[in-house]
Amino acid sequence: MDNPVNIAGVAGAGTMGRGIAHLLARSGIKTILYDTQEGVAAKAKALILADIDQRIARGKSTEGERDACARNIRIAGTLQDMAPAHLVIEAIVETLDAKATLFQALELICPENCLLATNTSSLSVEAIARTIQHPQRFAGLHFFNPAPLMKLVEVVAGPQTEASVTERLSVLVKTLGKQAIEVRDSPGFLVNRCARPFYGEALQMLEDSVTDAATIDMCLKSSGGFPLGPFELIDLVGVDINLAATTSVWEGFDKLPRFKPSPLLETMKTEGRLGRKTGSGFFTYPRQDNELAGDSPISTVKALKRQLETRTGVAVHLSDGRTARELSMDSRQPVIVLDRQTGNWRGPVSLAFAQHDLRNADIQSIALQAKSLGVELHEVTDTPGLVFLRVAAMLINEAAFAFGQGLATADGIDTALKLGLNFRHGPHEMLQALGIAAITSTLERCSTIHPSGRYDPCPALTSFAEEQTERS
């Protein structure tokens, strides 16, 4: 194998570039940090050291990490300063023209044995490679934000990338204490593609007036164990960034309906409501914390169902894709439908429900009984899959498409989303917990509401469900 990477360049000192430089420097790699805007790279280094200082104060970091970053990060005055690098990682604006211009300049500066890598999350590695003279030394090296903390890095070969290049990059990733996953160059690669429904279906529910953004976030975090809700995450990353990534994947897949960007994001971008960085997005910042506190004495929705039926005498169902109205008509009695979950509840619980033909007094009684068990019920529009099951169905369906196209194994997809996005459960694990019948039922019923093809079940869904994994 070629020489290891001892000196690395990072072009672009924004959030991602800063995080990558931090990660490289703390791992003992001499890091040259460059940005076209004067003073931005120096400010980025100062922010890295300030962040480490805060983490030291909380007992989360050490003086050794601070010293390594202070010593190893060198600010480049010009792009020419990248000449000694064994590897240059690009982390600039997500436009093909800008990246092509940068790499064309780097080819004239860096020696032939210097690897060139793009951190793009949405552009095609092949498209960038076509603009340069030596595509054999070029690859994708996609870190996740924040780079120092997230455990996964996608290594993406272009059609002319030499095998030794991806091998060197994978070894580097391991040196950085991360897990490398080699993925095919396709729209969104693996993680961003499979994650699109997390945002897209939440946005579709908002458009459908199922409930509000805060309720969707709370219910998804409780039922699915997601560290952040989709709207919190869009606000954190930036409405414009999320829209650009979604649009790129949508266009890369010839505008398939299931990837279609939400018009809500376009409106918010036009209005300048881009999330935390502008002070407003789906929420206003600084945001008041209205989250529940404490733990629930009950750990599963099945246990909650039994308790509510015993205490109230009302027919309680767990969502299987059928609406409360449909279940009520079949049984000829008033019903309440509870959303589903994967794993056990941790901490305070928010759970979506729908009902048909219940008296207000019964609804209030059920809500009070649930609250006494540590569960805050949120009534939503009577729709297939309610909140979590509907999002899970689309996450699972997209993972099945990726599996069927040979992008990764079921285990590989689960690992990628758990490490790349901090999901508690991967799509295959969700499928095993929820059952294929509930997933197909939800997709089929959603397709009657939106007959665009958005909810067409993946032909490989059954084989994805039957795939044996290391956990099986």
Image: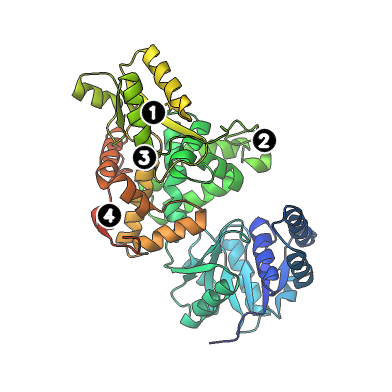
Mark 3 to mark 2: distance in Å?
29 Å
Q: Residues within 10 Å of mark 2 (few under 14, many from 20)?
A: some
Mark 2 to mark 1: distance in Å?
29 Å
Instruction: Classify mark 1: helix, strand or loop.
Output: strand
Instruction: Classify mark 2: helix, strand or loop.
Output: loop
Q: Is there a contact, CB below 8 Å, between mark 2 and mark 1?
A: no
Q: Nearer the viewer, mark 4 or mark 2?
A: 4
- The disc placed on residue 389 is 3
Mark 4 to mark 2: distance in Å?
41 Å
> Residue 94 versus residue 365: which sits nearer the camera?
365
Q: Earlier in the sequence, mark 3 or mark 4?
A: 3
Residue type for callout 3? Leu
Q: Is residue 334 visible?
A: yes
In this view, 142 is above or below 260: below
- Residue located 31% across and 43% down the image: 455
Return the residue at label 2.
Answer: 285
Q: Position of residue 94 (x, y in %)?
A: 58, 57
Q: Is residue 208 visible?
A: no
Q: Position of residue 282 (x, y in %)?
A: 57, 35
Q: Earlier in the sequence, mark 3 or mark 2?
A: 2
- Residue located 28% across and 18% down the image: 334
Return the residue at label 4.
Answer: 465
Q: Position of residue 278 (x, y in %)?
A: 67, 40
Return the residue at label 1.
Answer: 353
Mark 1 to mark 4: distance in Å?
27 Å
Mark 1 to mark 3: distance in Å?
11 Å
- The disc placed on residue 431 is none
- Residue located 61% across and 60% down the image: 147
Residue type for callout 4? Ala
